Structures are given as C-alpha cells and as structure tokens.
Image (cartoon, coloured by chain):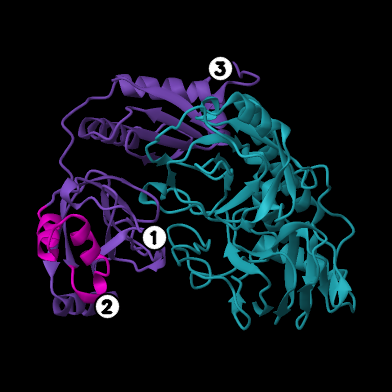
Chain colours: A purple, B cyan
Amino acid sequence: MKYEISPLGDTGLVIKLGEQITSDTHTVVRNLARGLEQHTPPGVIECVAAYSTLTLFYDPSLLRQNISVNTRVEADQPDLFERLSSHVKSLISNLEMSRIDEGRTIELPVCYEGAFAPDLGFVAQHNDLTTAEVIKLHTSGDYLVHMIGFAPGFPYLGGLSPSLTTPRRASPRKYVPAGAVGIGGSQTGVYSIRSPGGWQIIGRTPIKLFRPQEVSPSLLQAGDHVCFQAITEKEFMQLTARNAELAD
Amino acid sequence: MSIEVLRPGLLMTVQDAGRWGFRKNGVSICGALDDFALRTGNILVGNPLNASVIEITLANSQFHFHDDSVIAICGGDLAPLINDKAVPSWRPLLVKAGGILHFSSLQSGCRANLAVAGGINVPIILGSRSTDLRAGFGGHEGRALRAGDTLHCATPDDENSKRHGRLVDESFHQNFFAPRWFISTHVRPSYDSKVVRVLRGGEFMSFSERSRMNFFADEFIVTPEANRMAYRLSGRNLHLTRAVELLSTAVTPGAIQVPPDGIPVLLLADCQTTGGYPVIAHVASVDLPVVAQKKPGDSLRFSEISLSESHSLYLQREKDIAALKYAVQCQMK
C-alpha cells in the first residue's frame, strides 16, 4: 500500500492514500479505518475518513503517558509524532487487505413535488430534459457514501449521472431545510441539518440523517450505498407523521 | 441551585470541554473556546475539570442568583460586578442568594467563563453538555441563552462543599466574598500578547515565497466576520504558486485555511469537521485560549514553532493545570 504520513497541527496525523476520488482508494481508506478501529493506538481519540485520507486525532499527554509505561529508560523528550507514526506504519504493514464488506444499501424516500423541489425545473431546463426524466435519472442512480462531513450526518455521495450536472445557484439560500435533496455541480447529496446552501434543490426526504439522541448519530456511514425512491406529497406527510409518533 | 439570565449580552452559551469522538459522524467538537479558563474555573469551584460552564461574550450581560452559590469567573476581563460592587476574577467567589452579577464593560479579552459549583445541569448529548449552535442541539435547548432562561446546577459534591464552607466562614455580611489569593498571571496563557505560535500546515509550501514571508511578517486584524466557527483575518492576501484542487479532508480547530480570495480563515471550536481549502498553518493547541480572547479589531502576529516544541508546551500546560488543581485543593481544605 502506498501512503504518506504527515502531521495535522499538534493533535492530528494524516495518512494520505491517493490523489483522486476512486473506488479503489475508497476501499483502501475503509480497510485502514477498520484496522485502526480494531487496533486503536493508545492516545488516539478518533479517526476521520475522507475521500483519500484517514486522519487520526490524538491527545499528546495520553501518548506521553503510554510511552513512559512501555519503556524502561524514560527519554527526556520522546518524539511523540515519530512514535505514533511508527505504530501506524507497523499496523498498516500487518493489515490484511481483505475484501471489505459491501456497506448497507439505504433507500431514501424523496418527494420531488411542489414546494419540496424549487429548482427541479431549472435542473431539467439546464440539462435539456423534462422534470420526469430528471426524477427518473436521479432515482435510478446507485450512490456511494465516500465520507461524512460538512455537517453532522451529511454524506458526500459519488455517482451522479453526468446528465444531471448543474452548477450551484449564483446566490446561496440563507436556509435550506434539513432533508433537502440537492445537486451542486457534479455532486448530489441531502442536507442533514438546516443550513445555508447553494445547491439546486430538487426534492425532500422525511428521513432524518442526523439523530443526536442515538448512539450512532449519523444514519449513513462511509461505504454505504444510497438510492432514492420517489414518493408523493401525501406519502411524505404520512411518513413524517409516523416519524413524529415514533419519536414520542 | 438556580441562576436566571437577565440579559444575555452578545452571545451566551453553555459549554464544557467539547464533544469528542464523533467527528467521523460530522459532529463538531464545540466546547469552551478558552479551555484554560474553563478548566481553571472548574478547579476553583471544585468541579471536575470538564464540567459545563456559561461562556459569555463581550459585555453587558446579567444574572440573578436565586441561591447562595460558589462561582468563579475566568478568561477575559468583562468588569464583573455583584450588586454594583467590582468582583475579582480567577478566584472562587461566594455569591449570596439574590445577588445580581453584571458583566458591565469590556476591559480586556473577548469572553469570560462563569463556572458554578456542581456545573450547569443540561442534558448530556453524545457525551457532552456543549451547545452545537449550527446543528441546534446540546447545551440549553440547542441555542444561545436568552433573557428569562433559568439554569439549574447539579447538586454540589464534597469538593464543592469544602469551597462553600471555607468561603461562608469568611464572608460575614457581604453580598459576596472573595479570598485574597488567585490564579497568578504567570501560569495563565499570554492573553495580552499579539503573538500566536503556529505550526506549518500541509499546504504551506504551495504558497508563494512572498506569501509565506508575509504570513510571518504581517499583523493580521480580526475582522467583524468572527464567530465561534471561525475568524476571518485581514492583512495582505495570501496566494498559492499555482491553483491547487484539493479533495475534502479532515480539518481541526486552529487550522488557518486560505480560500481562493486569499483571506485567511482561522477555524475555531464550532468549525466543520471536513474542508477542502489549502491550510497554511495550525495554531499550537496551547495558544488557542489566546486566540479565543481576541475580538474584532484586535491584531495577531504568527510565529513559527516546531511540532516537538508544540508538544513540549502542551505537556507543560497539562502539568501546570495539575499543579493548580493540587494547590487550590490545599488552599481550600
């Protein structure tokens, strides 16, 4: 495995595994993330996977404590980053690059109608399609979750049909509601929290992608596959009512 | 024990040491921007180091204490008064029931932490009581505090009660009591300094030689576009030698990113977990409290240190905090 290790400030270590967004790099990142989760070096608090990097965040005082415990002669000032890098390198060399399990496939119901889809017309017109064709293309895609970031539970999805590529809005909206499904350039995604946003909004899902009360607060994880299923406004209301009931 | 917010000032939120372990779910760390003031305040009132406090920004905020309370004010000097009498910071205070605490005017710094014995009793979400303003959860109802909000404190424990007992013994008839000793300036971060120590960022060498020189030579001013997520800094714009298209990757508070417009953005506790702009430098962890006390109009100068120096400073700071804790416990026996 080819990789580079570098510091991220004084509490991060970045393992860079590629330069591009490819499914091979994605598989390597996921394998490594899994390996590090199973054999977390002492002093490491959490790992964040991205398109082509895996970043470990550590506590320097925990790292230091662990070194004193393991060495006979207490070095005056052990190089903490070097120690952690060595540990990571040996983990990587012992890592079994097994076929990583295919993530789950999550089907998200999306209403592409009326007020939920203010920019659907623009996306259609920009790509010389009818709105029905846009919906058909969007719902026949199989999207890979490359990483979670930007906001809690927000998935970076790969696999948008090139026929649906549409530039971001010239002026972003001040508020895009949670659940809004959008297209920005060659990316598609779902806003997991209400936030400002410049993407073209073509639909809305009643499913919550971010649940702070749950042990695993993000519905989606890197490696999952997402597909979208068109529902009517009535079905949207029914699903929303059912979610509210379950929450009580 | 309950505290009522009479005036919230510019921004007032419940924060603790932050929400760790969920960045892979896109959840920001949040937490007190001045973590030295957070931990010291908690030491002074006898709380665990990472208990929740109220973070107060700039001036003109007011509280009403419904019960006798042991508190401590650490961080910037917002000229605190109790029933119109000046009270000192960086030491434990006993406020009598009915006391009105008023942060009356900004003297130095930007934000103060109000630590209260027992900690602020709000629900723990994803392991923390910190407020995530952007995602709207945590702290008090996931939002900034407003006039009329009443906060409750958890039942004080033995450490808290020892403080209370000692202070009551010495308080006589006053509305508040403060001991003469306090946390010395020598152990505090250099809040008054303009200089902030940084490490080179991953894309440091992608910047032009002139920009790299300017980054360490110039004074940058904190612009009014400053909030708990980031500070935009004005100074000479910074340029890359050639355009770099970066993939989104993990970022962390203290990172100084430079978007295409060349204006550096210094990320803080509420920042997003990932980003794709080039990073020219990272603020050393020990100097994040110094940054936390800068406000719009203040200037910053960056000074480079190595990673191992940064770690030495970090470890020394942890030793200082442990020593402080021991010293205060001895004082308050």
* Disc 2/disc 3 C-alpha distance (Å): 59 Å
* Viewer-nearest of discs 2 and 3: 2
Badge 2: few (under 14), some or many (20 or more) residues near its Cα, within 10 Å?
Answer: few
| Residue range of the region highlighted in magenta in the rendering | A111-140
Marks 2,1: beta carbons within 8 A: no
> Which x, y percent locates residue A98?
18, 28
Q: Secondary structure at mark 1?
A: strand
> Which x, y percent locates residue A229?
12, 62
* Viewer-nearest of discs 1 and 3: 1
Residue A56 vertical position relative to residue A119 in the rendered view, above or below: above
Residue A128 vertical position relative to residue A25 in the rendered view, above or below: below
Q: Is residue A129 magenta?
A: yes
Three-letter code, disc 2: Ala
What label sits on residue A197 in the rendered view? 1
Residue B21 in sight? yes
> Which x, y percent locates residue A202?
23, 64
**In the rendered view, does B137 fall on the left or right side of B229?**
left
> Which image quadrant: the C terminus of chain A?
bottom left
Three-letter code, disc 1: Gly
Residue A68 vertical position relative to residue B323 in the rendered view, above or below: above
What label sits on residue A72 in the rendered view? 3
Marks 2,3: beta carbons within 8 A: no
Q: Earlier along the polypeptide chain: callout 2 or callout 3?
A: 3
Q: Which residue is mark 2?
A: A244
Three-letter code, disc 3: Arg
* Disc 1/disc 3 C-alpha distance (Å): 55 Å
> Which x, y percent locates residue B281?
58, 34
The verdict on a common chain for dots 2 and 1 is: yes
Q: Is residue A33 magenta?
A: no
